[in-house]
Image (tube, helix red, strand yellow):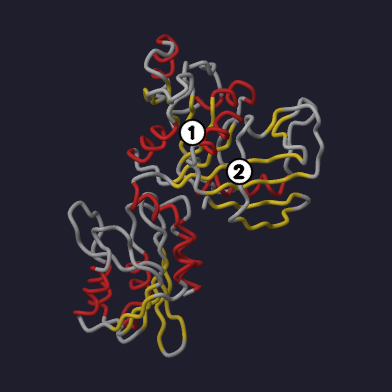
Amino acid sequence: MRRALELALQGCGRVSPNPLVGCVIAKGGRIIAGGFHGKFGGPHAEADALGKAGAEAAGADAYVTLEPCVRFEGKKTPSCAEAVVKAGVKRVFVAVRDPNPNVAGKGIELLKQAGVEVVEGICEDDAGEANKFFFKFVRTKRPYVILKMAVSLDGKIWSPETSSISNPQFAGMVQKLRNDCDAILVGSGTVITDNPRLTCRMPQGRDPLRAIVDCNLESPVNSKVFNDANCAVFCLRNADGNKRKALEKRGIRIIETEAGEDGDRLNLERVFATLGEMKITSVLVEGGRKIASSVVREGLYDECVLAIAPKILGEGTPAFESGVEIGFGNASVQTVGDNAVFTIRKR
């Protein structure tokens, strides 16, 4: 099953809004084939592995990281549960059930009714972690939200004296997050101040959708985030009409969103709900201070990846607005170069 999980992760950033799935076919104490879901619309893991195993799949065991799917209305690919039965697999080990109500136990029931032995719960926690984006999206229709921050020892996220707070190793982690997440979200302040590209720079990386929160469309039209149409801007209804036309001419999607309770910021909960409606299952929030503060204050994050760098900046921009704090009650920490990187899960 651990090998099946390794295979499943090879689909990171490529299968959304589908889940990551890996499958291993074993017989006589040896692995004879393995497969994974490699891209949205492509063969599922079971079909990939069974195709490689061929006739040897008869009488074999299958290890699958997620319950095999069944037929349902709107489904584009064949039933994996039926494929397993047809191949003559004797026994199926399932890490975790599919929370999708169109499947949710039906795949396991189909296997059992066909005489296939099913064993559940192998590496269940690891399988759930691998599909945390999919699980939240299926259950809530909202994306999994990761807040990423790099902070100095004195709590600053920007200083006029330094262009980078974290180290190159953490920067590599961020590029992996960009590859894995469906969208990256920043505010107009980040676009205006830093003029970032917000692309994935890892080899063979996938660029996420760039989601820009810009109430009044203040970002310059020639900003790098607007270099192609893989971008959506959330703004108020009365935002700059000329700027709107100029961005739409570039193919940028403009999405009118209601204001939040304070009246001068967008309703971020509505922004994330809209991204969910767009089949965005995961969002990496990269800043800046106002966006990060709102996400924490309103409890909209699922996970915070926080790098603490061994620097004292003195003058600069604090990580959060006054009165905003993030708890460390459910956190793990790892050393990444000279940075301490905390992964904090919301309680």
Q: Residue at x 27, y 73 (%)?
A: 108
In the rendered structure, the answer to whether residue 42 lies left or right of residue 79 reads right
Q: Position of residue 264 (x, y in %)?
A: 48, 19
| Residue occupying the point 59% across, 23% down | 189
Q: Secondary structure at mark 2?
A: loop
Residue nearest the viewer, comparing 310 with 204 = 310
Circle 2 residues within 10 Å: few <14, some 14–19, many ≥20:
few
* Above or below, comparing residue 32 to residue 219 in the picture: below
Where does the image place residue 45, in percent across and percent down from the top left? 37, 65
Residue tagged by mark 1?
Answer: 210
- The structure residue drawn at horizontal position 54% and vertical position 49%, both measured from the top left corner, is 303
Q: Position of residue 51 (x, y in %)?
A: 33, 71
Q: Residues within 10 Å of mark 1 (few under 14, many from 20)?
A: many
Q: Residue farthest to the top?
A: 242
Spatial CA distance of label 1 from label 2 is: 25 Å
Q: Position of residue 214 (x, y in %)?
A: 49, 22
Of badges 1 and 2, nearer the viewer stands 2
